[in-house]
Amino acid sequence: MRLFKQLLAVFAALLVIGAILMTFAYDVIKIDWLVFMELQSSYDDQEQPLPVPARSVPVEGVAYLPGMGEPENPVPADETSIARGAELYQIHCAMCHGAGGKGDGTVAAFLVKKKPADLTSEAVQVKSDGSMFLTITNGIWNPNNTLFPEKQFSGQMPPLNENLSVRERWDVVNYLRTIAASE
Ligand code: HEC
């Protein structure tokens, strides 16, 4: 009986010491409990967003689906639209394409593979409104970028569809039409 009591005392002492040690082991000994949030389909930082479900239609209209061709410009090039476009251009495009659209923005010096296009040039101005819209939406992809297939636009023009709403993109297109004339 005495032996049993002694053993119990030893166990109790070990338990107390163990408990004290465990408080310091917090975050050192990590036990990976099953958390149900781990089981959901999510994506990591910097990953491309999940693709849209098949047969879904964007709220902005079917014209903006990939592969549907160049959309028509639904926004009249009035004073308001051009003024808005000018402001948005200075925020979202000027760092690469330059304040005057000549392709001489501050970031341009760091783009080694392809320089930003001169937006006042004939080569760009002959493009349709819809083509410019799609350039802003999708960026210009480099299909030869095998190093980062998910970043095929790297080094060239990034897609800006998350920076500019559809209406804002058309405002920028309307402004681009005036950029050559304002020289
Ligand atoms: C990170 C720098 C960068 C930003 C920001 C940027 N562009 Fe570009 N853009 C480029 C580069 C680089 C090219 C040339 C790509 C090429 O020729 O492959 C280009 C090309 C273009 C072209 C010519 C497309 C063609 O088919 O030749 C248009 C139009 C254009 N950009 C419009 C815009 C507009 C409008 C914005 C702002 C909403 C914008 N870009 C923002 C870098 C940029």
Image (cartoon, rainbow, N blue to C red):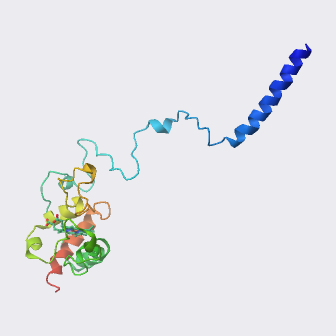
Q: How many marks?
A: 0
Q: Is residue 57 above or below residue 108?
A: above
Residue lying at 40% horizontally and 43% vertically, measured from the top left: 42
Closer-to-camera residue (10/107)? 10
Residue 49 falls left or right of residue 132: right
Residue 68 visible somewhere in the drawing: yes
- Spot occupied by residue 54 in the image (x, y as percentages of width and height): 24, 41
Quadrant in which ligand 1 is drawn: bottom left
Q: Quadrant of the C terminus?
A: bottom left
> What is the x, y in percent for residue 123?
8, 72
In the picture, residue 17 is in which quadrant?
top right
Where 103 sits versus 33, above or below?
A: below
Q: What is the residue that sits farthest to the top in this orientation? A: 1
Q: Quadrant of residue 15?
A: top right
Q: Residue at coordinates 28% horizontally, 46% vertically from top-left?
A: 52
Closer to the camera in the image, 22 or 59: 22
Q: Which image quadrant: the N terminus?
A: top right
Give me the residue at 49% from left, 39% from top.
37
- Let me know if residue 77 appears in the view: no
Pinpoint residue 103: horizontal percent, then vertical percent: 20, 76
The residue at the far right in this view is: 2
Where's residue 122, x and y in %? 8, 75
